[in-house]
Amino acid sequence: MNKFRDSLRDKLLLGVCVFLLVSPAISFFVWMLSLAFKNEVDNLAYPPIFIPSPPTLANFVKVFDSGPFFQYLLNSIMVSGTATVVALLIGVPAGYGVARLKARKLLMVILIARMTPAISFLIPLFTLFQALGLTGTLAPVIITHLVITVPIMVYIVSGYFETLPMELEEAAVVDGCSPWQRFRHIALPLARPGITVAGILAFIFSWNNFIFGAVLAGRETRTLPVAIYNVLTFEQIAWGPLAAAALLVTLPVLILTLLIQKEIVGGLTAGGVKGG
């Protein structure tokens, strides 16, 4: 009876903690939904009107009419997708090397690039890309996003490689496998959940980045977060179109997360178990 009571208390406490952590994000998302489907009169009404009556799609129409939305969507996919793929090609072998060499200090040096404010990179990078004639294209945006994706990839993947049992690789050494063969045929398949999680997080961070695209991209190469900024007006903030644009930017990442949430949970859970 006491065990049942303690288990019920623990579950209730866990539920309360989860609710307190998740409720702010859910409330903001629900409020954004409400703003996106209300007209501007209801959005500015006091007391606030939470449920639109009737719902309207006019805000989404304004977003699509304000610029080439699908072009911006394609730009974001190309930038985030390319930056994530390059980060995988660079970060996974680098993470394996850091894990096997136990190069903790090198890992901290790599993380400095992620912890440094993005604005500190902009002046030298803008000067460099301007001298090369690349400003206004997607190339500088993709290159600068590697500052975001590669450190995340190395950090998460190296931690996951450290949890893999060394006995398997030691057996491969006895069989005459080279370091590359051990990485390719043993470590890489076992680390697939961790690599998946790292790739997803790198893509999300790249997708949500604003500052690099705002400075280095041109009118035709803007990403979606930069396109949202263009919805703002100097006279008055149009809350409906702004919320609709924010919802459209959030939707692809939200759908991606929901589709592969099992991979995320499995990767994070497996990475927390130390291999023997």
Image (tube, rainbow, N blue to C red):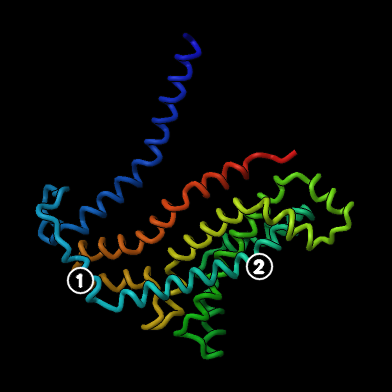
| Residue 19 percent across, percent down from the top left | 37, 36
Earlier-in-chain disc, 2 versus 1: 1
For badge 1, the amino acid type reads Lys
Give the residue number, with chain letter if any, for mark 1. 62
Q: Residue furthest top?
A: 1
Q: In the rendered structure, find residue 90 and report the number of the disc placed on it.
A: 2
Image coords of residue 269 (percent x, y): 58, 41
Q: What residue is drawn where x is 83% and y is 52%?
A: 172
Identify which residue, 242 or 202, lies in the foreground: 202
- Count of all numbered marks drawn on residues in the image: 2
- Residue ID at (72%, 48%): 162
Density class for disc 2 (Cα within 10 Å; few <14, some 14-19, many ≥20) is some
**Element type at marker 2?**
helix
Near-viewer residue (113 or 252): 252
Which disc, if any, is residue 42?
A: none
In the visual, does 118 lie left or right of 208?
A: right
Q: Quadrant of residue 235?
A: bottom left
